[in-house]
Structure formats: C-alpha cells, structure tokens
Image (cartoon, rainbow, N blue to C red):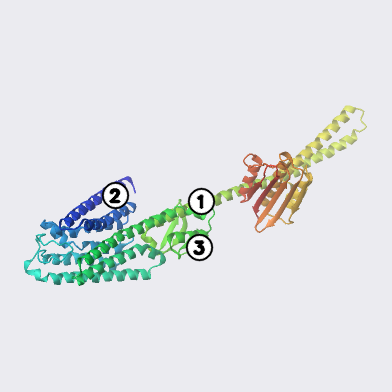
Amino acid sequence: MNREGTRLLRVRLAVAGALAAVAGATGSWSYARVGGSPTDVVQDLSVGLAYSGAGLVAWWRRPGNRTGPLMVAMGVTWFLGNLQGTHVPALFVLGSWGEALNMAVLAHLIMSFPDGRLPTPLRRRTVIVAYGLVAVGGLLRTMTFDPALMTDATYLDCPSCGPNPLLVPAATDLFHTVDATYRGLSWILSAVMVTLIVRRWRHATVARRRALLPAWIAVVIATSFVLWDLVLYLLPGMSDPVKQAVYVLSDLSQVGVPLAFLTGLLRMQLQRAEVSGLVMEVGAEPTPGRLREVLARLLGDPSLRLGLWREERGAYVDGEERTVETGSAGATRVDSSRGTPLALLRHDPALAEDPELLDAVAASLRLGLENVWLRTEAREVTSRIVRAADTERQRLERDLHDGAQARLVFALMALRRVEKGVADHPDEKLRRSVHEVEHSLRLALEDLRGVAHGIHPAVLTREGLGPALMELAEQATLPVVVTVDPRRYDPVVESTAYFTVCEALTNAAKHARAKAVSVSARHDGERLVVETVDDGIGGADTARGSGLRGLADRLAAVDGVLQLDSPAGGGTRIRAELPCG
C-alpha cells in the first residue's frame, strides 16, 4: 500500500472508531436511562466494543478484506436497540426499526467470511433477505409498536419512552401478530444460514475447513443466542433472575463471535509470517518433494501439487515427473524475476480467498528457486572453469613434453656427440665449456620435467589416480603408505584428488614435521573419499593457510567437501569427498 492509501485508511479507521465510540456512548446512556444496571450496561458495552475493536484491528491488518468493516458495522448496530430508551422521536424510531439490524449484519459477516465477499447467488440472496426482513419487518413492527401498551415487547422496560412518530394507533392490535411473524421469519432465516454453513463445511476440503472454522464457531454462538431469544419469547412468565442469567450468557457468547473472526484473520496473517521462513526451512538445496511437503503444511492443503518449469518439455513437472496442468481455479503461477515461467502451484480453490497469503508463498518460492538456480549456475560456471583449467594443464604438460622437453633432449643428445668429438681436443677450456653446457642442459631438462609434472602428471592421464599417487609417494621426502581402489574416475575428479594429496604431503613435510603419512582413496557410494593422515604436530587451520583454503575452494568448485581434523600435538587428518557417481 502506498503512502496515499495508508493515509486514506487511517482516516477511515478514525471515522469508524469515532462512530463506534459515539454509538457506544449513546447506547449505554440510553440503556442506563431506562433502568439498566451498571452490570447490564458494562455487559452490553463490552459486546459492541468487542465487535468494533476487533473490526478495527482486522481492518488495519487486512485492509483489502471486507470482514473488518463488517465487524465495525456489527459493533455500531449493536447499540441501535438501546435508542428506544430516549424521548427523542427520531432516535426512538431508529432504535425500534433497527433493533435487529445487527443480526442482519452478523448474517452478512458469517456468509461472507473469510474474505468479506459473497461469491454464490444463494449466499447473496440470503443476505439480501436478512436486510430486507429488517427493513420491511422492522418497519411494520415499529408502526404497530406503542411502548406504553407493549411493556414487555423489548428488553427495555420503558412505558414512557417515545413518542413513536410512526405509530398507527388503529394497528396496535396487530403488534403481537407482526412481532411473532417477524421473529418467526428471523428464526427460519437463521435455520437457513445454519444449513448453508453446514453444507459448506461438509463439502469443504481441509484448507477450506480451516478457513471456515471461525465462521463455524460464530454460527454456533449466534444460534445459541437466537435459541435463548426463542426461549424468552415462548416462556414469558420466566422469573427475572432466570431472564437476567440468560441475558448474561447471551452477552458473553456474543463477545466470543468477534474474537473468533479476528482469530481466523490473524491466523491467516500468521500463516504469511510462517511462509516468510520458507527459504530457511527447506534449506539451501531443496528438492521438489521437500518444497511440496513444506508448502502443503504451511497452507494446510494436503492435496497441493508443485510443478517446476521444464523448458525442454514446455510444461510444469512435479517431483514424480508428472505434468501439472494449468487452470483458472486453484492454480497460482510463479514467474522468475525476469518474467519467465518458474513454478506452478495447484492448490485448493479455498486458498484463493486469501490472495495475500498466496502472494507471500509465491514470493518466497520465487526467492528459494532462484537461489537454487543461482547456486547451480555458479557451481556449473565454476566447474567449467576448473575443467577448462584442468584441460589447459594437460595441454601444457603435453606441449612441454612433446615440444620444449623433446627439443632439450635432442639438444642434449647432440651436445653429447660434440662432447665425444672434442674428447681429444688439446684445448682443455673448450672441453670444460662443453661439459658445463651439457650439465646445464641436463639440469634444465630435469627442471622442465618437474614443472610439467607439477602442472599435470602424465601418469595421471595415462593410468589414473592409483599409479599417480604411487609415483607421488615414491618422490616424497618422507615415508608414505598408499591404499587406492583400482578404478578410474572423471578426469577432473582424479586431478582434484591428486592435487589434494599433493597439498597434504607438502604441509606434512614443511609445516607438520611429520615422520610418516598414510594416504587412502576409496569409492564410497557415489563419492570418492580421499584421506591423508600424518603423525605431525597438528594445529593446521584453513583460515591461516592459503594452500588449504585454496584446496577447499577447488573442492567446492566440483561440489566436493573438505574436512580438516588437526588438534595440537595430535597429527592432521585431511578428508576430501568428491562426487563420482
């Protein structure tokens, strides 16, 4: 909601609050004026203010939902009947005519919960009949009502109230007939409402029943109120203490109605708050099944289906590779931030009655799926870089072996022939120079071989990880015991495992002051597990060493994991796990 919308909402809430306060004050004053005890007035005021207060809270929290304004209207109309206790003719007529208007508003509230709309013609007609009954029946009743003659016609005992400017004196004899008919039609309408709610409940899904629960509670409470009113009407000789007890129970039950509706609305808001934690709950790598499970629980819809967009199939597909069909009812589409299809939720149509909840779910789902997509893209890009670097290492090793190294070997062989040719030459300085050049070429060749081997050992490409580690152990400056499963892996996996062992042996020789190292490489399910254990001084830490930190980064690039266990004085264990399924 923008700033202008927020300002307008605040104005409306202020006006509604002022109207509720005026209605409550006027109604309480009128009730007290005709003999209502302080307890009666407090009880009556509590009911009206409970509706108004709950309505204002619901209106503020969910301004797009009409339930809040209806509850405020219920709170205001609750006090209309009390105006019959005044001597102002206009107020008396308003109170007599609108005495049951609050029940029509309650019917509207119940029929339209949870979103304040009346989607079916039957519910719309029921509400229209309720308001029409008050408009017509209330008017006819007022036209025949003389408070001086019908002292027991209302809960107010005020024969001197009025006068009633709409009274038709010749029709006062019809009052009891009109009143009985009016009440009877109200009871019939209440029964119809109960029937409609029961039918909605019986045919509702789990999600819809959760949404309708507050309305169901309100129906039970409102029905009990109507039944108590019926008891009072059918048993006019009931003693005053019993009547008072009935009124107290009626008022207490009415206080529960707005609380039930407010609880339902706030429960939906709590659902949206729970949805905000969806990304954290499903984790960094959620599967479609896990996402569907969490969403079904949050939305209270076991039938929910989640389809993820598959570009190659041009459809939304669930975790079981079944197509999730789009449709108008009970379908919420989730697009990416770029506007491309991302996911589709097939849910109970009842959830469409809370569009804010579905918007929150869509936003959280979009964030979670795009986060997964970004992580996957990052891994793929990094993996491509690692693979490209590994390929480039192999190319450099081949180029050095087949190019510079071969040329140096050829030059060394030629120089040795020259050395033999000048063996009997009288110039000793020349013979010594040729020998020094031959020695330098031999050292250069050894250095070049070392560089080529460091870039990418040829034995790793030709024979695999096992022989490469055996050769590495033979070249190490300390004893190394190697145990390797005899099998080949993906070239990137083999090179990553090989250089992991290289880094571990370097650390053991340079920093750990180890006397021996054991190396193992085994296939475990869909992962290659490589471990190096030395008997050095320990204390290794990836945070302090660039070599181990770079090793962890390289492993992460191919979706691998590095584990380091290096207690002070207890040696160092480096464990690397790489996917190789």
Q: Quadrant of the C terminus?
A: bottom right
State which tag comes first along the sequence, 3 or 2.
2
Viewer-side residue, 152 vs 571:
152
Q: Position of residue 433 (x, y in %)?
A: 85, 30
Q: Position of residue 12 (x, y in %)?
A: 26, 50
Badge 1 marks a residue whose secondary structure is helix
Residue of label 3: 318
In the figure, residue 87 lies in which quadrant?
A: bottom left
Residue of label 2: 9
Q: Position of residue 491 (x, y in %)?
A: 68, 52
State which tag comes first along the sequence, 1 or 3.
3
- Is 422 on the left or on the right of 61, as rendered? right
Tell me the mark number nearer the camera, choosing from 2 and 1.
2
- Is 302 on the left or on the right of 503, as rendered? left
Query: Which residue occupies 66% across, 50% down?
Result: 576
Structural crowding at the residue carrying mark 3, measured as other residues with C-alpha within 10 Å and reported as few (<14), some (14–19) or many (≥20): many
Query: Which residue occupies 72% across, 48% down?
Result: 533
- The kind of residue tagged 3 is Asp
Query: Which residue occupies 49% across, 61% down?
Result: 293
- The kind of residue tagged 2 is Leu
Q: Which mark is residue 371?
A: 1
Mark 1–mark 3 CB contact (< 8 Å): no
Q: Which mark is residue 192?
A: none
Badge 2 marks a residue whose secondary structure is helix
Is residue 466 visible to us here?
yes
Alpha carbon of mark 1 to alpha carbon of mark 3: how far? 19 Å
Mark 3–mark 2 CB contact (< 8 Å): no
- The kind of residue tagged 1 is Asn
Viewer-side residue, 565 vs 568:
568
Query: Which residue occupies 41% across, 66% down?
Result: 206
